[in-house]
Image (cartoon, helix red, strand yellow):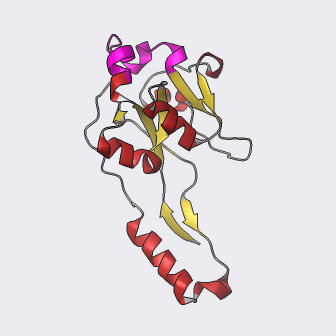
Amino acid sequence: MIRLVLDDVLPVCAPDFWQRRGNGASSLADVHESLFIHTNWGPNYASHPTWADWFAASGGSRAPDPSHGRRVGLSSLAIVSARLGLGIALGQRAMAHGDLEAGRLIALSSVSVRLGHPYCAFMAPAKAERADVAGLVALLSKTAPLAWEPRAPLDRT
């Protein structure tokens, strides 16, 4: 097993969404519950970060009710939903990185919550010595971000 990256989640949304729906809020604590996108990580993911976890990490105690916002079953769907202007998601930084860099998403806070488990590369020991497998693992190890250096977000915590 080779650890590639320990990802985190942070609040992201489309810039035009925040202009239309969020500018009246002085912080994410003031945003209406219906604007949050909730990811259902499924029963097998033991340490799934929620909006309540994010608010606790930011020093608050708010716990938005998932039944009042959008709910999606995949992290990628949460990011796509945010990019389409459907709300504010806790986006995985590794997945949202390109959209953040391109300006299709904005980070609303520098506060993030780490996922409970890293992304890893697993391979059978007998295959680890193969040139193609070793090359793929080397490429993944080289390109996987070991530490994120986010751009300065809008601080709406």
Residue 154 in which image quadrant: top left
The residue drawn where x is 54% and y is 59% is: 119
Q: Quadrant of the N terminus?
A: bottom right
Is 27 located above or below residue 75 in the figure?
above
The residue drawn where x is 29% and y is 34% is: 153
The spot of residue 51 in percent (x, y) is 53, 28
Q: Would residue 30 be counted in the magenta stretch?
A: yes
Instruction: Tell me how many marks there are.
Output: 0
> What's drawn in magenta, residue-wise?
17-35
Does residue 62 appear to the left or right of 21 in the view shown? Answer: right
Residue situated in front as seen by the camera: 134 or 118: 134
Residue situated in front as seen by the camera: 113 or 77: 77
Does residue 92 appear to the left or right of 109 in the view shown? Answer: right
Is 17 located above or below residue 117 in the figure?
above
**Residue 157 visible in image:** no
The single residue placed furthest to the top in the displayed view is: 24
**Residue 118 visible in image:** yes
Does residue 145 appear to the left or right of 69 in the view shown? Answer: left
The spot of residue 95 in percent (x, y) is 46, 48
The spot of residue 81 in percent (x, y) is 51, 32
Residue situated in front as seen by the camera: 151 or 20: 20
The spot of residue 130 in percent (x, y) is 58, 89
- Magenta stretch: dominant secondary structure: helix
The residue drawn where x is 67% and y is 87% is: 126
Q: Would residue 29 be counted in the magenta stretch?
A: yes
